[in-house]
Image: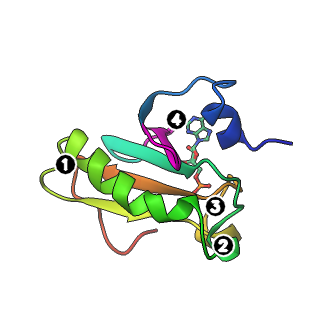
Amino acid sequence: MATLFTRIIQREIPADIVYEDEHVVAFRDINPQAPVHIVIATREETPGLAQLPDQGDHRAILNAARLIAEQQGLKGGYRLVINQGEDGGQTVPHLHAHLLGGRAIGWPPG
Ligand code: AMP
């Protein structure tokens, strides 16, 4: 069964898509934690960072994050986060990164 994010990528579930290329699709998080909160999901259904293959779409996440940050005008900086597994706070088992910006992001995370 397709993951939630695959269903967004395939346009079965609506989302505010802000960027896509052959490897990743990026859309606004439905529960934003910052003025700009964008999920960058791989087209491939890798469950998470722990299952990262040697080759594949995940390599495009960093490049997409840089391009989206420029597109969104995040001149003051931003944070890129990948949650892995239960302790990492991951809720959707489909590899993705969160791009957070538009305010100062605190450290350490909760
Ligand atoms: P994670 O907890 O790292 O797995 O991140 C999953 C993210 O997906 C959460 O921040 C959710 O708010 C977000 N999310 C869940 N459903 C949707 C949706 N339909 N559209 C956009 N973002 C979603």
Q: Residue at x 61, y 71 (%)?
A: 49
In the drawing, does residue 26 fall left or right of residue 12?
left
Look at label 2 and name its amino acid: Pro
Q: Earlier in the sequence, mark 3 or mark 1?
A: 1
Q: Find numbered disc 3 in the image and state the secondary structure of the residue it sits on.
A: loop
Q: 31 or 40: nearer the eye? A: 40
Q: Position of residue 43 (x, y in %)?
A: 61, 47
Q: Residue furthest right?
A: 1
Q: Residue furthest left?
A: 75
Q: Residue at x 30, y 40 (%)?
A: 35
Quarter assignment of residue 14: top right
Report which residue position mark 2 lands on.
Answer: 53
Report which residue position mark 1 lands on.
Answer: 74
Q: Earlier in the sequence, mark 3 or mark 4?
A: 4
CA distance separating discs 4 and 1:
20 Å
Disc 3 within 8 angstroms of ligand 1 (CB): yes
Q: Find numbered disc 1 in the image and state the secondary structure of the residue it sits on.
A: loop
Pick the quarter of the image with the N terminus.
top right
In the drawing, does residue 20 fall left or right of residue 68?
right
Report which residue position mark 3 lands on.
Answer: 90
CA distance separating discs 3 and 4:
15 Å
Q: Quadrant of ligand 1?
A: top right
The label number, if any, that marks residue 30 in the structure image: 4
Whether 9 is drawn above or below 44: the answer is above
